[in-house]
Amino acid sequence: MKKTDWQYLIDTLLFLCIVGIAFIGFLMGLVIPKGPTATESAKYFLGLHRHQWGNIHFYLSIAFIVLVIIHLILSWKWIKSKARQIFKGRWATTLILTAIASFLVIFLFWSLYPKVPSTYETYGIRAGKIAKILITGRMTLHDIEDETGIPARKIADKLGLPSNAPLNETLGRLRKRYLFTMQEARDVVTSLMKKK
């Protein structure tokens, strides 16, 4: 492959990465809710959780950085010659300052972003309890009651379990018998915690 073919391939991959990064950024910023007040089921989009979209965003960002470095290496002669043409004897200093400025952008955003620590002091905490607990199939309704203070019977009723359903049996077994999903159990607990 010729150098121009490599440049075309790298530029195409850069375009695909930046479109993916921008799409997921808008998705996470405007579509998928965040924070403890949103139910876990609302944090899914096209079958992926908000954190999974965040992972894809992270990996696309890493790929983008690697591709930018390759792009700069492939275009280095052109960059150097254009900088010499425009900035004459100061071309090297200009390129160094450009590289430094790219890092200063992060500092600029950090300095301009409002810092209100009190806004986040109770993030994820509600009435002294953690608003979201890890609920697994190995837990019983009594375990959840111990963690949250919500009566096990109340959780069972919200899940539509009969009054004779054993509250000391694991959720994994209960869900197979009474046909509810773990996500439904998590949503019920989250909604009951909000009402506490």
Image (cartoon, grey):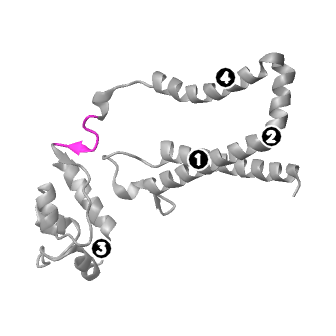
Classify mark 4: residues with Cα within 10 Å, few (<14), some (14-19) or many (20+). few
Amino acid at the residue labelled 4: Leu
Tag 3 near tag 1, CB within 8 Å: no
How much space separates mark 4 and mark 2, taking CA atoms?
Answer: 18 Å
User: Is residue 57 one of those drawn in magenta?
Assistant: no
Quadrant position of residue 73: top right
Q: Earlier in the sequence, mark 3 or mark 2?
A: 2
Q: Earlier in the sequence, mark 1 or mark 2?
A: 1
Query: Mark 4 — residue?
Result: 97
Classify mark 2: residues with Cα within 10 Å, few (<14), some (14-19) or many (20+). some
User: Is residue 124 one of those drawn in magenta?
Assistant: yes
Amino acid at the residue labelled 1: Ser
Query: Mark 1 — residue?
Result: 61
Q: Secondary structure at mark 3?
A: loop
How much space separates mark 1 and mark 4, taking CA atoms?
Answer: 23 Å
Query: Residue 16 versus residue 179: which sits nearer the camera?
Result: 16
Q: Nearer the viewer, mark 3 or mark 2?
A: 2
Query: Mark 2 — residue?
Result: 75
Q: Secondary structure at mark 4?
A: helix
Q: Nearer the viewer, mark 3 or mark 1?
A: 1
Which label belongs to residue 180?
A: 3
How much space separates mark 3 and mark 1, taking CA atoms?
Answer: 38 Å
Amino acid at the residue labelled 2: Ser
Quadrant position of residue 160: bottom left
Magenta stretch bounds: 121-127
Above or below, 48 relative to 8: below
**Image quarter (top left, top right, bottom left or bottom right) of the N terminus:** bottom right
Instruction: Give me the residue at 31% from left, 47% from top.
Output: 36
Q: Nearer the viewer, mark 1 or mark 2?
A: 2
Q: Nearer the viewer, mark 4 or mark 3?
A: 4
